[in-house]
Image (cartoon, helix red, strand yellow):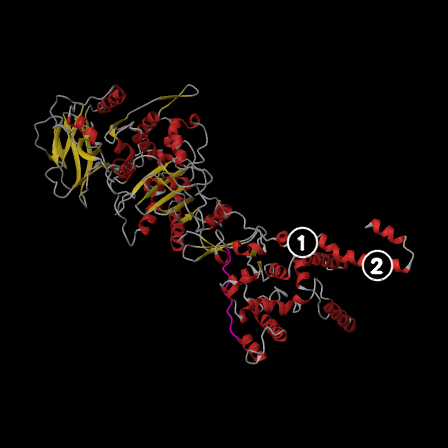
Amino acid sequence: MKLILRSLLKIKHTSKVILAVLLICLLVRLLPYFAAIHTADIAQNQLAMQFSDRNGLPLGTLLTRDQEHTSVVPLNQVSPQFTHAILAAEDGSFYHHGALDMKAIIRASKEAIHAKRIISGASTITMQLARMLDPVPRSFSGKLSEIWLSWRLAAGMSKDEILAAYINRLPMGGNIYGVEAAAQTYFSIPASELNLAQASLLAAIPNNPTYFNPYQHWERLKQRQKYVLNRMVRDEYISDAMPTAASYAARTSAEKVVFQSRQRGIIAAPHFLFWLANQIPPSPPYKAENQASLFKGGWGDKSVIRTTINRPLQQFVEAQVQHVISSLAANNVHDAAALVIDNHTGEVLAYVGSPDYFNEAKLGRNDGVQALRQPGSTLKPFVYELALEKDLIRPNTILADVPAHYAIPGAKLYSPTDYTERFLGPVRVRIALANSLNVPAVRVLEKVGVETFLERLHQLGFEHLNQTPEHYGLGLTLGSGEVSLWELARAYVTMARLGDATPLVSRFSDSPIQNPKSKIQNSATIWQLITNILSDNHARATAFGVDSLLNLPFPVAVKTGTSSNFRDTWTVGFTTDYTVATWVGNFNGEPMRQVSGVTGAAPLWNRIMLHLHEHQEPAGFPPPEGLVQLPICAISGLRPTPDCTSVVQEYFYPKDKIAYEGDNEFNLPPEYDEWLAKQQQSSLVSTNLRILSPHHGDLFLLYPGEEAKQKLEFKLGGNKSAPVEWRLNGEKLNTNSANYLFWNLRPGKWTLEARSGEMTDKVTFQVELARIKPTHRGFSISNSQVKENSP
């Protein structure tokens, strides 16, 4: 430019001066094209997201980062009525002039000079768009900047592109921007469906959104609408073809239009919406050639993202989370989370991250579904499944629940114990898993190997277990790592689907967001066996009782977990249709008081499961394919002998039947020595007399039709030779045996007393009639005072 000016200064002849002036005009005319702005340069990528549930019910809107509610639509998806109305109101000759309307500028200048004040403006839609893109002070220099930007827009964009960019940025009141956001907010319809009355009202707002606020200044807005309609008549958008255009406009102005009360913010599932928003990639650039694709796939029709959430179920779960937390407040419990999954599709039906997202004082924005916490015993089923798959244990294997010690780095010993701090001795796999016994689980993990188990957990989707096997050690099966409720639910969905892993789906789109589908390569029979164990109410009776919150009136497999120091409680379970995962604890890490998996997270899980199956019970779980059921002695796991006091049914591999029918001599191996010694010591109390069976507080079920078959052994420890007097509820029992006898079960509450000289011992137990006869017997004795066995 400096070079051109120096050249012009040397020009002396008139013809050359004229040529120079023409050259300057040409440069001014062409210069905007060298700095032209194109549609892609001003693309609106940070848009508000509107969400609906699976049935189209609104869940809420998440604003852009600057808190604006903005939705973008292509020009061909805007009602022509609105396009005509906004053109008539703001720039009637838009398609007939350039960036500036020189006729309007001359007219406005004359009016201002004559009236000595500004009567009307001359700002075009292109100039208004420039002002939206780069707000500048209302000064002479600011106006020049606005004009320059307008020229650049006109140089790089077509008229339709400028109009589309303009109507998608129009201020429509409050933090609403663009005709689509206004149509959805005020009328719950897309911009394409606006009629003349609605369109003319919306076109009246941008002139002064505060002054024409539809909720506060309705009469003002109606007056502005009349102005818009009259301009439409003048510009023949309401044509003479209509019966008397002016009267038609008048009738439109008088037409009753109802503005909906604004549903501010989020209606349901706030944690889910914010989580999902972070999973969705940014919208594609707003270009004319890809307008159609802008709303395809993840964004859905009319810019509303259709999620898999079921809003009525979501709101029910939210209410239950709040109710359960309020009932546990005295136990120092403040937070909870829940997740509901459809097993058939992997779709997320409900997602609650905390009792109240909007309560910042109580850390409500923390998302308990995605937060990493110690899972307690909820990983145990997967180590048993892996051990069965690798044939390291059998369905009828007897495991040792006795004291065990393991060397760990630092010259320390790891000695796992249960919540009750007592050991049961020889236990079946079924009993060990169902009652969540810690020592047998650690023994099984020792057989499998921590590294192998960690690899399986990665296959199941536990991506946050990313430390070395040495870091977790044998405590991995007891919850020494950290996982999320999302990961845990996904793994249990895989179990419910018999090893067929599926991603969890959160929205309806062309492809799921999460991990690809995979198959855990093993027999479905093993998954069926694990499910069978987790759904056996009688097998878990020792730890939970036979009538706990885990016992539902339909088939359900369930596992609880409690982390160390009672900071987290979990309950995860499934029917054939749904998986429900719940967590109860404190976001700040404070321990709860007297709360375990069955008393913390289980009440929430129980309510959700009952609600899901309120109108239709789920199908039963199929029995493990290819396995056979045989009677065994519960202590030895072998074929029952006449002196066996507890006979149950257990699954066997067909190839194990030969061993079952052979030698059934049972001798406890050396690993039981320490436990046996303690049993003997516990029998030699100060009175030197102790009732070993039944235990104090035991509950027994008496099944219909088996009254004559079910007998209970009264067994005494210590006092090997002195005569014993047995009394039941004060009545003396006739017996010739000093240290044991068998009694036919009868319903009632019983007090058993044993006397020998000056020595005495007393226990109470209860016998109840079972409501139904089970298809197979697991373990019917329970101690109702004992809570969960595992930390």
Q: Nearer the viewer, residue 673 or 84?
A: 84
Packing grade of label 1 (10 A; few <14, some 14-19, many >=20) is some
Please name the residue shown 35% across and 24% down the image: 415
Range covered by the magenta-colored residues: 255-265
Residue 482 picture location, percent across and down: 43, 35
Residue 565: tell me if it is visible: no
Q: Position of residue 775 (x, y in %)?
A: 19, 41
Between 498 and 679, the residue placed more toward the observer is 498
Q: Nearer the viewer, residue 675 or 101?
A: 101
Pointer 1: what residue? 37
Name the kind of residue labelled 2 in the image.
Answer: Val
Instruction: Identify which residue is drawn at 27% across, 46% down.
Output: 552
Q: How many marks?
A: 2
Ranked by sequence position, the earlier of labels 2 and 1 is: 2
Q: Residue at x 78, y 73 (%)?
A: 114
Based on the displayed image, in which of its 4 quarters is residue 683 positioned?
A: top left
The residue pinned by badge 2 equals 21
